[in-house]
């Protein structure tokens, strides 16, 4: 069994400090994902992070954050939702493993799970946007 070690750090962007957690040696879990609120996510995007929207294509077409890239984490099926089996492959076609990413969905559930999969696939700089696009619209009242 591999030993797991959490390394915590803070990074400063403008006047704000953001937590960064690195998990060394071992598979990542939900609690290993760094989640920030929409205000912090907006600052990360201003500083050069890229936005990955993991909502369905239909949700994305209803509205999205400026310059967002859409790769659905789940698909709607007749039986309910099913995980996109090509998710990591599709994300890898758009982003490098060391690109700093902010990942969001509608409310923050799918994006958190997507972040775990991305971290376990070797993506190094993944941040979850808590509250998702719904909170972005509610709190920031803008799509950019």
Image: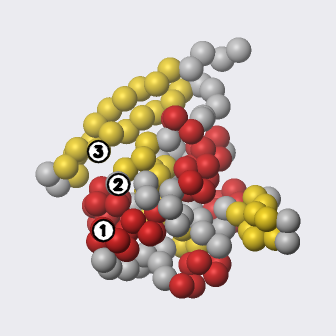
Left or right: residue 83 compared with residue 22: right
Left or right: residue 47 compared with residue 132: left
Give the quadrant of residue 120: top right
Q: Nearer the viewer, residue 1 or 36?
A: 36
Q: Position of residue 42 (x, y in %)?
A: 31, 64
Above or below, 23 against 129 in this view is: above
Residue at 30 percent across and 68 percent down: it is 139
- Tell me how far mark 2 sits from mark 3, CA to CA: 10 Å
Secondary structure of the residue carrying tag 3 is strand
Which of the two labelled residues, at mark 1 and mark 3, occupies the earlier sequence position? 3
Q: Which mark is residue 99?
A: none
Residue extending furthest toward the right: 79
Q: Nearer the viewer, residue 70 or 60?
A: 60
Residue extending furthest toward the bottom: 62
Secondary structure of the residue carrying tag 1 is helix
Residue bearing the label numbered 3:
18
Residue bearing the label numbered 1:
139
| Quadrant in which the C terminus appears | bottom left
> Dot 2, how many residues are within 10 Å of its Cα: few (below 14), some (14-19), or many (20+)?
some
Q: Nearer the viewer, mark 2 or mark 3?
A: 2
Which of the two labelled residues, at mark 2 and mark 3, occupies the earlier sequence position? 3
Q: Nearer the viewer, mark 1 or mark 2?
A: 1
Residue bearing the label numbered 2:
37
Q: Position of residue 81 (x, y in %)?
A: 76, 63
- Tell me how far mark 1 sits from mark 3, CA to CA: 19 Å
Q: Position of residue 25 (x, y in %)?
A: 59, 25
Residue at 60 percent across and 15 percent down: it is 3
Above or below, 20 against 113 in this view is: above
Residue at 23 percent across and 44 percent down: it is 17
User: Does the residue at mark 1 contact the one at mark 2 (Cβ under 8 Å)?
Assistant: yes
Q: Is residue 97 visible?
A: no
Above or below, 90 against 121 in this view is: below
């Amino acid at each position: 069994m591999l030993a797991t070690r959490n390394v915590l750090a803070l990074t400063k962007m403008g006047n704000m400090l953001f937590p960064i957690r690195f998990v060394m040696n071992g598979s990542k879990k939900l609690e290993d994902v760094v989640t920030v609120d929409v205000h912090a996510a907006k600052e990360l995007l201003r500083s050069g992070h890229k936005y990955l929207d993991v909502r369905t294509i239909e949700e994305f077409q209803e509205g999205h954050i400026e310059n967002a890239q859409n790769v659905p984490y789940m698909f709607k099926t007749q039986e309910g939702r099913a995980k996109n089996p090509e998710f990591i492959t599709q994300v890898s076609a758009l982003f490098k493993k060391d690109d700093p990413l902010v990942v969001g969905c509608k409310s923050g559930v799918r994006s958190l799970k997507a972040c775990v999969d991305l971290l376990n696939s070797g993506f190094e700089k993944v941040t979850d946007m808590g509250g998702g696009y719904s909170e972005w619209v509610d709190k920031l009242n803008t799509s950019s």
